[in-house]
Image: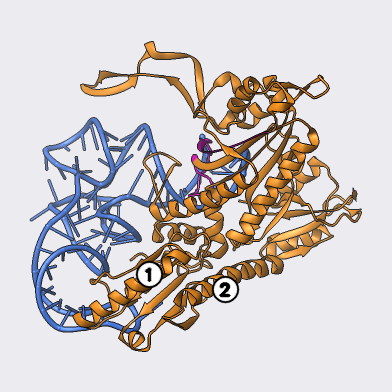
Chain colours: A orange, B blue
Amino acid sequence: MAEITKRADDYNRWYQDVIREAELADNSPVRGCMVIRPNGYAIWENIQRTLDAKFKELGHVNAYFPLLIPKSFLAKEAEHVEGFAKECAIVTHHRLMQVERDGKADLIPDPASKLDEEYVIRPTSETVIWDMYRKWIQSYRDLPILINQWANVMRWELRTRMFLRTTEFLWQEGHTAHATEAEGRAETLQMLEVYRWFAEEVLAMPVIAGVKTPSERFAGAVETYSIEAMMQDNKALQAATSHDLGQNFARAFDVKFQDQAGKVDLVWATSWGMSTRIIGALLMTHSDDDGLVLPPRIAGTKVVIVPIWKNDDEKSAVCAAAQKLAAELRPRIGPVHVDDRDNLRPGWKYSEWERKGVPLRLEIGPRDLAAATAMLKSRHDGAKRTAAFVDIADGVQAELDRIQRDLFDRAAARLVANTHRLDTWAEFTDLYANRGGGFAHCPWCGDAACEAQVQEETKVTIRNIPLDGDETPGACVRCGKPSRGRVLFAQAY
RNA sequence: CGGGGCGUAGCGCAGUCCGGUAGCGCAACGGCUUUGGGAGCCGUGGGUCGCAGGUUCAAAUCCUGUCGCCCCGACCA
């Protein structure tokens, strides 16, 4: 059994150790790409299930667009190409041929199969989607279009990290088309709120919702909104984004419609996404030195039952009781696992399921069986309590609810404790150089050059301008020029 | 892509400087005793030393190239 590095000793190594020990993902033979293992994918499936239901509840539908995008599409929106050109994988041939090199068989792209127009592996799908929207939209009666897709995308990042930044990642991308600017903006904000709800209520991850500064805007957007979460090392992680694209993509792809009065206008657009990166955020929000900690609402396995016995008679009695309890719990609780392996002792099983982040463990031994109770132990705080067999589902559900609340409260308390209101540059540099960093709400002048200067000197960036932020006029924390309100600063992943 | 570190059994590592039959701990497998917080004893199996060339009688070890991982930068969800 490999050890998990303590967070205090080496936070980055701890992060990787937890991924390995909880069997969330593994490195693949391809640079920067990871294999998401069943334990990790179960989390993603729960994310998909929950978000997908919410999207549909709000009128969205799913569709699928191709992985390959004609290279020329990317060039149609000026800022978009500038944002993504440097990180695209490109398909140039469609056939391999066998050749002999130094006496050995080798495969090379067949020169005769070189493509006239090369394809880009999608870094995001706005272009191919808006090319199709041109065909589908003629009248205001065709609007709105509220399409989402679950897909993989590739961005050839220079430096990768499991879940947080991989060359290929999974996400959902919503792409909507609207008849009015107001409708587009409302959709953008609605989806931002969906992400806030999901992060806080399902992932137990408190976030700050706000609008990005122009320099952090999505390539091609009029306005970008984000939710920002605080990790245990006090760094910020952008957990999701929602973009108001205005008419930029409609203009680039010539998507027009006729309104009720017969007037022709460009269509208004939004896009919004959450990716597998959120799994890294989830890990860094709740987990501890013993391994993964998961909120019950997103955990793949909600409860593990560990039967305890001393001999074959006890084993059969206790295992039968465990299976019966599991069957009783499943309809109400969801996935419940009975760990009846007989080659491992209970202590080993405890530590294994703790590493893997199962929120609640239920122990049943001969003594419990005699008393018709089970021992409950919650992963995140080690609290133990007994629950009677008669209303076991109630007891377990109550404990899972408590865990979910507790994890949110714990993360929220950490967020508050490490968030500061700062007015002077001396306090600002002191916070990030000597006091462990965190979130800082500070007045800012609105000048991109000043923002860049802060980043250069401290590696701290403006995460967003909180929607419910302080709009009291003041003096910029960096340059002292007039400020129209406070913005959220932090070091970011 | 620049700087640094590292690829040896599933995991963690020693061996590399100074070439000479590939080792240790944990895990795995078999047996017996065990089982309420990481069990004990005995036995067994498993590695073309990241990959490709080269030097040599002989390469994990020396040389060249290459791929991957980690950390720091630049870029980013």
Q: State the residue position of label 2.
A: A402
B41 lies left or right of A432: left
| Three-letter code for the amino acid on which mark 1 is drawn | Ala
- The kind of secondary structure element at disc 1 is helix
Q: Position of residue A408 (x, y in %)?
A: 62, 67
Q: Which residues are magenta?
A: A145-168
Picture quarter containing residue A269? top right
B32 lies left or right of A250: left
Dot placed on the residue nearer the N-terminal end, 1 or 2: 1
A126 lies left or right of A392: right
**Residue A145 or residue B21, whichever sits in front:** A145
Do circles 1 and 2 both sit on a common chain?
yes
Residue at the (39%, 61%) spot, across then down: A21
| Three-letter code for the amino acid on which mark 2 is drawn | Arg
Magenta stretch: includes residue A231: no
Q: Position of residue A214 (x, y in %)?
A: 76, 39
User: Which subunit holds the residue at mark 1?
Assistant: A
Disc marking residue A326: 1
Q: Position of residue A351 (x, y in %)?
A: 38, 72
Q: Considering the image in quadrants, where does the N terminus of chain A appear?
A: bottom left
Residue at the (69%, 61%) spot, across then down: A438
